[in-house]
Image (cartoon, coloured by chain):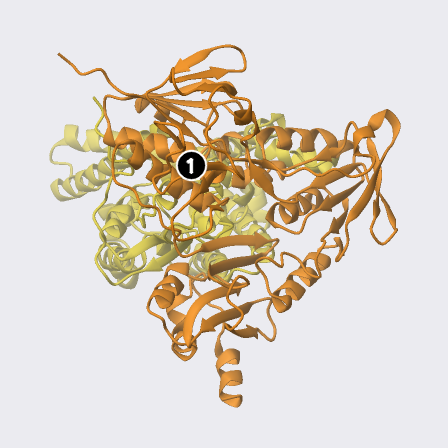
Chain colours: A orange, B yellow
Amino acid sequence: MPTPSMHYLIVGNGVAGVSAALKLREREQEAKIALLSGESDYFFSRTALMYAYMDQMSLKDLEPYERGKYKDLRIDLIKGWMSDLDAEARLVTLSDGRTIRYDKLLLATGSLARQTDWPGLAQVKEGVVNFVTLQDLGRCEALTPSTREAVVVGGGLIGVELVECLLHHGRKITFLVKDPWYWPVALGGEEGEMINQHIRNHGVDLRLNEQVTEVFAGEGGRIRGVRLASGAEVPCQMLGVAIGVTPQIEFLRRAKTPPALNRGIVVDEAFLTSLPDVYAAGDCAEITLAETKPFVEQIWYSAKRHGMLAAQAMLGDPIHYQKPLFFNSAKFFEIEYTTVGQVNDAPQDAEHFFWKHPHKEASIRLVTRNGALIGANLLGARWDHTVFERWVREHRSRAFVLAHLREAQFDFEFGRLDLRPLYEKELVHG
Amino acid sequence: MVKEGAWGKFAHDVTHRGVSAWLLAGLLLGFYYLLYYTETFTPWGKALGLGSKWGFYGMLYTLAVLGGGAYMLRRYKHNRYQIVRTSVVMFVQFTFAFATPLLLKAFQQPEYYFSYLWPLKFDYFNPYVLFNLPLPMLLYSVVGSLVMVPLLAVFFGKRWYCSWVCGCGGLANTTGEPWRHLSDKSTASWRFERVAIYSVLGLCVVLTLLLFVSFGIKNRIPELTKFITQYQYFYGLLVVTWLSGILGVVLYPINGTRVWCRFFCPMAALLGVMHKVGRFQIRVKDNMCISCGMCSTYCEMGIDVRAYAQANQSFTRASCVGCGMCAEVCPRGVLRLENVSKPQPQFQPLVQITLR
């Protein structure tokens, strides 16, 4: 007699949810696996929304897997928004009233754009956008034709992406960053200065140490401008708000049996929530480990990792998640960025070595502590982060790293960043 | 979202299979009909001192490669690989595919193209042609095809030919650039590719063998000679004229720039086998892929590069011409073309799942 097969339900078809589904199928041939999403029919790459906005890719190009793959792997795709959870009955209810029974549930609901409350915002009915979801993209595209001037708020990754898109469409842009330089969480002052200049060279009106204090509604509730902290008023027909993302968990607070919630859905080292057989992974999970402060990881790489590990935990593997050595990448217009380990979050007694290429928009920052590498910020060239990770693990000295930098270069053939100016400078200064 | 303005709308339409794209394909087809099946351009070629309609076509082709090349050099000025590669392809087209044959003809020598080799140009192994060539060209044909081509492919990948030297690739990677994303990325098209390209290679090898037989038996079996002549005619019409000469370019606005190279070119098939066992690979940086798909979108050979990148798997695909555009468009610098000295890892399926 065949054993009744498990039913895995995954809420959210982002990278965490899909990575989990693929891992589950890889290990369990018989199980029933369902992926629920209200946002999109198929998994798409959120990181590529900007390329769709700039018409460099079609929406279908954004999908990492061929559509037939889900059928081949017998992963059921369900379109709908989850609205309720009954962990005792093992039942998920959708906003249209449908119910789905599960044996094990994975919540991978991701993030939503963080909102704020400026005076006057209530009167604005149209023209304020985020740039996180497929629906956000649709709103941006609908508003762009009737926009001459746009204001983008938020000195992070999504902000600069939105600026790049609007610039591509020939809009006049005022880019507001509340800090003295762009992205101070990740970049040091010298790097920030280089990026500031790069953004300005593209014709963007970048304003530092600046914030919106009030927004003005025009005809029909369409935004017509903003007032800044400095008192200046900037006209705009579109206001892009990119001040970060926040775990999408609010709907769970109203559930019949909500899991423990804090900043995100509280999970243990095996991605298990406070409810039996209910797991959470990706941006929406707040991981609570014995030795560290609870943390939320909200980047593509962590979501992919969480998804796979949560699936393994659901399959019964012993999972003890440990926050791995941090790495990330980004691109600010043409400048590529790679970071490894601790840089701006390094302890006070860490030493920083910074070098800017004399003629190119490229820089290297090495952070050492007690003589050993703990992190690096690399701009304007391509680097293999795994080599830096190894150097961090091996506690390599700055001198060693400088002498071996070539091994980590990942530039195009014939296009290696010229490090000779670095070594000449190093020789002069000892 | 499509860029506004007349130019923006047109640029989108003509590169996204819109009405203007189909019109362009129709115009190209009309042009090739006049070129191949009429003598419309013969007087033009004579008037320009280029001898024939083919001389005229060669000039147009070279101008397209040079003009499109200039566009490439400007667009990718930050990428040294693209600059070097494009410069070489422009130089080869002008020197070996245009100026040298003209000069040779002026000196009463056979019109020989050093940039073309068997099996792409099967005539260079056609004994009736081969043994009438002057000795240096005869040697170049034989040594070039049997030694130089495979050796370079083993060391540098098929790219040394397909995106650095070849005229078909030259046009695709210059004037054809705006249409590269139209290549079909589906698994179905990959399946078709494998059947089609090795079939044409088979047809070409059989043709070459038959021509040697025909040459050897000297019309002692008239039926066989007649059959071989018909076979050669059939191959010439289907492969040389239509697939390579006409459709290869006519389909740019519909199926991208590498329809001939990817599905039918016997040279690409042979080179692909060499580079599979050779040193070339596209290296994937571990865990850095964000699955955006720019690499796959802009792969002119329809390779789903993203599938490898997001699986952290360095790879060598037989069809890869090493144009380097996947690495160029990758916003996270995940991909790198390289010639490695260590042996290739064995191919692994992307998702290890056995289907029922």
Q: Tell me if residue B304 can be seen.
A: no
- Using the image, determine if residue A9 lies above or below residue A137: above
Q: Position of residue B274 (x, y in %)?
A: 24, 51
Q: Position of residue B295 (x, y in %)?
A: 46, 44
Q: Quadrant of the N terminus of chain B?
A: top right
Could you tell me the amino acid type at mark 1? Ala
Residue at the (25%, 61%) spot, across then down: B139
Q: How many marks?
A: 1
- Using the image, determine if residue B341 lies above or below residue A353: above
- Nearest the eye: A418 or B355: B355
**In the figure, is residue A31 to the left or right of B324?**
left
Residue at the (21%, 33%) spot, across then down: B228
Q: Position of residue A59 (x, y in %)?
A: 54, 31
**In the figure, is residue A159 to the left or right of B93?**
right
Locate residue A31: give its quadrant: top left
Q: Tell me if residue B173 can be seen.
A: yes
| Element marked by disc 1 | loop
- Nearest the eye: B12 or A426: A426
Q: Position of residue A319 (x, y in %)?
A: 29, 42
Give the residue furthest to the top: A97
- Nearest the eye: A287 or A310: A287
Residue at the (81%, 45%) spot, across then down: A213
Q: Residues within 10 Å of mark 1 (few under 14, many from 20)?
A: many
- Nearest the eye: B232 or A106: A106
Query: Which chain is home to disc 1?
Result: A
Residue under label 1, please give it. Answer: A281
